[in-house]
Amino acid sequence: MEQQPKLTENREIIAFLAETYPQCFVTEGDAKPLKIGIFQDLVEALADNERISNTRLRQAIRHYTSSMRYLSSVKAKALRVNLDGSTGDAVTEEHESYAQERLVEIKARIAERKKKAAEARKAKAKDKDQEQGRKARAAKPKRSSKPRTDKPKSPAKATAPAKPLAQSELHVGKSVQILVGSNPVQATISEVLKESVRVTLASGMAIEVANDRVIAAE
C-alpha cells in the first residue's frame, strides 16, 4: 500500500481533523469551543498516525483556536465539546473576555491593513496622474525658433484676427483650430465642457483648452 504524504500545512491538518472528528472541528460554518486539553486527546488518538507530527498538530490547533470564527464561539456558559462531539465544561466569563479581546485586536489589524492598502492605491493613482501630466506637457507643441522666410503681407491685405467660435458652434467631432500661443493648430473636438473643450490633435495627443482659444478650421 502506497504511503500517504505527510500533512504539514495548517489548512491540511484542520481539514483532516474536520473529516475525522466532524462533531468537534469544522472548516465552514459556526465553530464550537473545544475541550480544554483537546491537544493531548488528539495526541493519544492519533498516536499511530504517521502523517501528522505533534509539532505540526500543535501549530494547527493554535491556528484554529486563533481564528475569528473560533473566537466568536467562545461565549460564557457555552459547552465545550470533546472529539466525539459530547459536551463537557462550560466556557467561563474569563475565557469569553479573553476571546473578545483577541477579536478586537484581529479586527483592528485587518482594518489597519485595509487602510494602508487604500492609501497605497491612492498614492499609486496620484503618481500615475502626475506622470501623465508630465508626458502631456512634454508633448505640447513648441514655437519654432527658425526665422520666418515667407514674405510679410502688405498692410492692405492683412486679415483680421480670427474670432473664437461661439458656444453653440462647439460640437463633438467638429474640426477646429486651437491657438497655441498665437499659432493655430488643427484639432478635433472630443468633449464639450462648460468653459472649455477637450480636443485631439493630429498627433493623437488629447488636451483641454479654453473656449476662447478655439477658432474655425481653415
Image (spheres, rainbow, N blue to C red):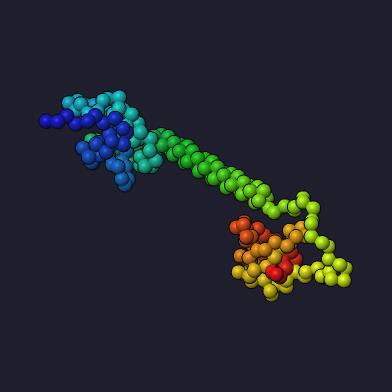
Q: Is residue 93 visible?
A: no
Quadrant holding the C terminus: bottom right
Count of numbered badges drawn on the protein:
0
Name the spot of residue 54 as percent of width and height, x first: 27, 25
Q: Nearer the viewer, residue 61 or 134?
A: 134
**Residue at x-position 25% and y-position 36%:** 17
- In the picture, measured across the screen, residue 178 lies left or right of residue 58, that is right
**Residue at x-position 63% and y-position 65%:** 188
Q: Nearer the viewer, residue 204 or 115?
A: 204
**Residue at x-position 87% and y-position 71%:** 156
Quadrant holding the N terminus: top left
Name the spot of residue 107 as percent of width and height, x first: 47, 41
- In the picture, measured across the screen, residue 161 lies left or right of residue 119, that is right
Up the image or down, 185 lies above or below 57; here it is below
Q: Quarter of the image holding residue 96?
A: top left
Up the image or down, 69 lies above or below 203; here it is above
Q: Quarter of the image holding residue 55?
A: top left
Name the spot of residue 155 as percent of width and height, x first: 88, 68
